[in-house]
Structure formats: C-alpha cells, structure tokens
Image (cartoon, helix red, strand yellow):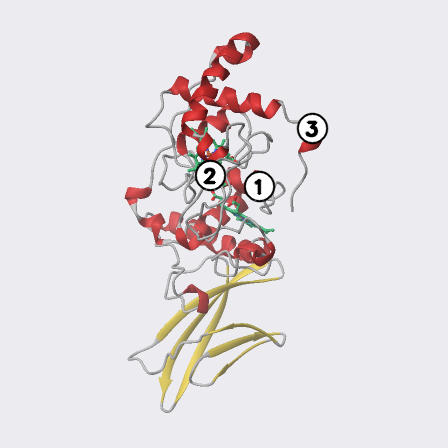
Amino acid sequence: MVRHRNSGYYARLFLNGKELWRIRKKGCDREGTGRWWRHTKVGQMFFSLHARIFPTGLVCAAALLLSPGAVLLSQDAGADAKTAKTPKATGSDGDKRRELHLYMKGRFLFQKHCVDCHGKTGRGNGPFAAELETKPRNFRTGLFKFRSTPFGRLPVKEDLQRTIRTGISGTAMPFFKEISDEDVDALIVYLQSLSRKWKDPALAAEPLTIPPVPEWFDEEAVAAAHAARGGTRFAQLCALCHGAEGKGDGQGAGRLMDAWNEPIVPADLSVPRYKSGESPRDLYRTIATGLNGTPMIGYADLLQENEIWELVAFIRALGQDAKPGAIEPQP
Ligand code: HEC
Ligand code: HEC
C-alpha cells in the first residue's frame, strides 16, 4: 500500500507501513511548485519517486509518482544529497539515462556494501571506522592513494575497478570479486558524485606508461647487481622513512600524518604484502605515481625508468627474504 502524508513541512511516503522516503525541505513557501525525486529499491526492482509539492490554500498538497527504472533529472532534496550532487548528465538521452541508472544503482550498492566503513555519506566515518587502524577513505576529499596517474591527480576508472575487485591487503578494505562489472561501474559513478574534484579537468590525467619489465629481471646474477644499485639509491631517497632495511622504521617514521589527519606509518617493505600489489609492474607504478594524501610522493619526474626498476628489484629482494610465516592476515 502506498500512501502519503503531508504536514506542510515534508511529504512522506510509506510502503507497507515502512517509511521509504520523505522530503525534509519546505516546499510550499516558494512560488510555484517544488519538485523532487529519489530512488529506492522494492524487492528486486528499482523505483524512482517523484514528488510535486504545491500550495493549495493553507495546506500543501503532494503528488507522488512511483515509477520503475530511470527518471528525468530534477532537484534532489534528500538529506544527504545536499552536497552529493546527482551527476550532471551530458550527451544524448541514452547516455543520460544510463548514467542515471548507474548512479542510482551505485548509490544503492554503496548503502548495502560500503557504509559500515565508509559512512552513509562517504565521509569515511561508518560505524566500523573507529575500530580500524587504517581509516576507511573519506570520498569527500577526492584524494585516492592507488592510481596509475601522476602524483596529485585523480585515478582513472581502471584504478578504482582494481581497488574494488582486489581490495587493499593489510587493511579492512575487502575485495568484491563476486559482483558484476556493471555493479563495479555503478559504484564508481556513485563515488565520483561524492566530490567536486571529479569535475575539475585539471585533476584528470592519463595513466603513466609503465615500461616493459627489463630482461635482466629474470637473470639472477644480473638482477642482484641491479638490486644492489637500487639499494644504494634506496638508502639515499627512501631509508629516511622506510628504514635502511625497508622495515618501515626510518628516522622520519613515527611522526608522519596523512591528509586526513591520521598518523601513518611507512610500509614495511620486507613483508611482500603491498597495498597496491606486489608484481614488479605494481611496484613500479607505486614508486612512479606515489600515494596521494600520504608522505609517499611519486618519483616519476625524479628518477629515470631504469633507476625505478632497480628500486623495484631491491624491494623484491627484501620481500623474498621474508619467511612465509611472517605474513599474517591483519584485521
Ligand atoms: C570493512 C571495511 C570496508 C568496507 C566494507 C569497504 N571498505 Fe573501502 N576502504 C576501507 C579502508 C580501511 C580503506 C583505506 C585503505 C588505505 O587507506 O590504505 C578503504 C579504501 C577504499 C578506496 C580508496 C582507494 C584509494 O585509492 O585510495 C576505495 C575506492 C574503496 N575503499 C571503495 C570501497 C567500496 C566501493 C566499497 C563497497 C563496495 C568499500 N570500499 C567497502 C574499508 C572498507
Ligand atoms: C616521507 C616518507 C617516505 C619516503 C621518503 C618514501 N616513502 Fe614509501 N611510503 C611512505 C608511507 C607513509 C607509505 C605507506 C602509505 C600507506 O600505507 O598508505 C609508503 C609506502 C610505500 C610502498 C608500499 C605501497 C603499497 O602498495 O603498500 C612502497 C613500495 C614504497 N613506499 C616505496 C618507496 C620508495 C622506493 C621510496 C624511495 C624512492 C619511498 N617509498 C620513499 C613514506 C615514504
């Protein structure tokens, strides 16, 4: 049963006695009509709810329309939607509709799978957050650590796909292997609606090219010589934070803060469980692009390609020394 009540302050919609939706803003004190929409899921179906509020004498009347699937864009007065703008649709009607469909689906999936950690409005303050040492990302800041793009820029879609599909090892961020490609895309469209940074063309960037892994990587003796050179460079550039043996205990460690005002420790590189992957190409990407929001900058402009590969070889050698038992799952 669908019914609506109107107190003059907001319209509410009930389905089987459960409040599905309400308008919190006054609609009547404005000229003309107020118009809102919101989406919800009933059973397996997505519905969009349209409301039109208009003054009729002393009271407000609200007309509500329940329609399946995609909707036309109008003002969203949802409580948490004030800053989270619905993506401005551009392009053809078909694109517009698809974008909205993904946004609606993404928002629903986010509420289902992500809010416990990332919080209802994506501020990283879900109920689990207090317990976690590495805090869930606050998506309102538009800062992403794991990217293939230059330091300071936004990630590309593939980067977010990788994070969602593979999770972030050593942290609470789980992997979502079972969900469909479309669901991942939908989550990404929703994440991109949470910060204005996504609208700034200056922050968008193409991925850096990762050159092919050098042939010497497979020849043990040659690789060892390169790794040794990498070690010398590591001592100059990286040991301050990561420590001489890469254990994350350099002089500078212990007082580092991240962009979200949380203490952060340099990675222990002697344990091959890196957040952004442990293949040589993953490590190259991490060193070249850095991790936004952390003291770990990108070295693409500071080092030559072969110098980065030598660092990768050094870190891989550190990791190989780790005993299998040293890698324990963390909460
Ligand atoms: C159990 C807690 C938890 C859940 C559930 C969770 N995350 Fe996370 N997520 C984290 C933590 C913790 C981090 C921060 C890891 C770090 O900074 O190293 C994170 C980071 C991220 C990042 C940032 C990656 C970057 O490059 O900075 C993305 C994107 C992300 N999560 C997406 C999602 C999505 C989408 C969902 C739901 C489908 C989700 N997370 C569910 C805990 C969680
Ligand atoms: C100013 C301190 C600082 C310096 C200098 C620094 N790092 Fe880092 N590095 C960090 C911090 C902090 C993290 C952990 C970030 C996190 O966990 O989110 C990190 C993480 C890493 C990671 C792991 C990324 C992952 O996926 O888990 C690698 C690899 C790495 N650094 C390599 C290097 C190399 C190579 C250099 C030198 C060229 C270097 N770092 C210099 C602070 C630093």
The image's mark for residue 251 is none
Q: Tag 2's secondary structure?
A: loop
Determine the residue located farthest toward the bottom in the rendered image.
Answer: 58
Give the CA separation, mark 3 to mark 2: 26 Å
Q: Tag 1's secondary structure?
A: loop
Give the CA separation, mark 1 to mark 2: 11 Å
249 and 112: which is toward the camera: 249
When the figure is inspected, residue 146 is found, relative to residue 45, above or below; the finding is above
84 and 277: which is toward the camera: 277
Instruction: Tell me which label, 3 or 2, sits earlier in the chain.
Output: 2
Give the CA separation, mark 3 to mark 1: 21 Å
Image position, residue 60 (x, y; %): 40, 85
The image's mark for residue 324 is 3
Look at 56% across and 21% down and name the residue there. Answer: 317
Rendering quarter of residue 110:
bottom right
Instruction: Tell me which label, 1 or 2, sits earlier in the chain.
Output: 2
Image position, residue 267 (x, y; %): 53, 36
Identity of the amino acid at label 2? Phe
Quadrant assignment for the N terminus:
bottom right
Look at 63% across and 42% down and name the residue there. Answer: 178
Disc 2 crowd, CA 10 A, few/some/many (<14, 14-19, 20+): many
Image position, residue 189 (x, y; %): 44, 49
Residue indicated by mark 1: 167
Identity of the amino acid at label 3? Pro
Disc 3 crowd, CA 10 A, few/some/many (<14, 14-19, 20+): few
Identity of the amino acid at label 1? Gly
Image position, residue 106 (x, y; %): 50, 52
Which is closer to the viewer, label 3 or label 1?
3
Q: How many labels sit on residues?
A: 3
The response on whether ligand 1 sits within 8 Å of label 2 is: yes
Residue indicated by mark 2: 146
